[in-house]
Image (cartoon, grey):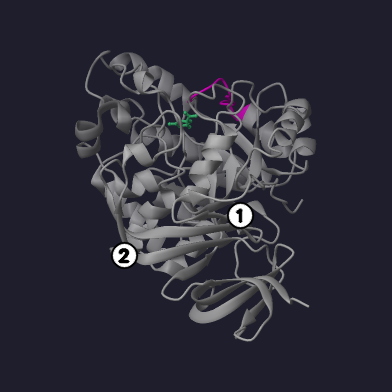
Amino acid sequence: MTAYDLVLANGQLVRPWGIEQADIGVRDGHIVAIGDLRTAVTAERIDCAGLHVLPGLIDPHVHLRDPGDPAIESIPDGTKGAVLGGLTAVFDMPNTAESVINNLRLTRKRDGIKGRSWCDIGFYVGATKTNIAELAALEEEPGVCAVKVFAGSSTGDLLVEDDESLRRVMLNGRRRICYHSEDEERLQARKPLFAEGGPYRLHMEWRDVECAYLGTRRLMALARETGRPAHILHVSTAEELAYLRDFRDVASVELLVNHLTQSAPEAYERLGGYAVMNPPIREQRHVDAAWAAVADGMVDTIGSDHAPHPKAAKERPWPATASGLTGVQTLVPMMLDQVSQGRLSLTRLVDLMAAGPARIYGAVAKGRLAAGYDADFTIVDMGRKRTITNDWIVSPCGWTPFDGQTCQGWPVMTIVRGQLVMREDELLGKPIGQPVRFRS
Ligand code: DOR
């Protein structure tokens, strides 16, 4: 009798306590053994000598635009990009063409992934001023990773900006709430100050440091008052990172790869509208503060904020430029390259991109190479050097802000619950993605 469906042999396993060479035995989609499995009987054996085996990496911040316009992005294409880029799960934002704000739409969305998703998915539900009373029930629904609050406006019409409504959101439910933190009043007041058609870097002057910092100060006051935990998404300023240090009882922190690898004014000069996102790319001192926060443990998760828009919308003059950058396919290579450059260790990368999302969102059986966990693996070759190009991007919008970027370190296999779905840039099998399970 075969003991295992799959054995990953001879890999360098990235475990919470360090890197060690061992074999992994998989059965029925779970890790069942880690050790010396040279003589084990298995249906399939993959030699991982020379490769690092990471727990399946998770992008906790993507906009797959489904329902929406499949000519820009969709669950099938976005999750193809995810597994080609080495991700085994993504958490999808609710600001879609019909926003995910009630049970009917959530059910439609969850049912709609069957046979269409290449990786596992978690779903955000959006808060609005009219669904506050439903949020406590919605956040307990299967597959829901968190409530998302746009406290400052961005793409789409989701917005809860005033303190009284935010307080009511916090008092309805108990799981960690994820915030887009930019102060709406300040955003609106500043917009007329800048000339239309001006340079793209006006985006960061309009949505300035104080917009983000003030937004976060207001949220922290309310989080303390209500006791409701807050995950501040895409923190973009040195000021917020310093401030949040005193709020670790209620606050956790997400950074984006864009804010770690791109700085103003260079990014705006080089990329034009393809550097425009919310919150904006800012000066180098914020990038330095972000790396210091990665090093000292302030950061809990790293995401891509994959936000596809058509090229024509990205090339419109500012401020009509669509905000948002693609990133689901490039997140892992870009972060592996940071490891190669010595900015973080592979164990810290796994802490931020697998264990971190699992802990912050309460994902069940994800994020760790250990017996009993899901057999999700991101297998990487740290010796592989490859250049990201627009023609590699499967999102129909067809562009990446990282076009031309050479990365040292590349994902070579993606395994979702024991199924090999990507090997050497080739999609394998079928889209078997399921809703991620979350602890209530
Ligand atoms: O730049 C952004 N684009 N920031 C967001 O918060 C939303 C996103 C989108 O959906 O386009």
Tell me residue 140's x, y (percent).
Answer: 78, 43
The magenta stretch spans residue 162: yes
With 282 as the anchor, is 187 left or right in this view?
right
> Residue 18 vs residue 29: left or right?
left
Image disc number at residue 360? 1
Q: Is residue 416 visible?
A: yes
Helix, strand or loop at mark 1: helix
Whichever of callouts 2 and 1 sits on the residue coming sooner in the sequence is: 2
Which stretch did the figure color magenta?
154-164
Marks 2/1: CA–CA distance: 26 Å
Give the residue at x 44% y 56%. 424
Q: SS for tag 2?
A: helix
Above or below, 7 relative to 408: below
**How many numbered markers are drawn?**
2
**Residue drawn at (31%, 17%), measured in percent from left and top?**
316
Secondary structure of the magenta portion, mostly? Answer: loop
Residue 344 in picture, x, y percent from top left: 37, 65
Looking at numbered disc 2 in the image, what kind of residue is underneath it? Answer: Ser
Residue under numbered circle 2: 340
The quarter of the displayed image where residue 396 is located: top left
Q: Residues within 10 Å of mark 2 (few under 14, many from 20)?
A: some
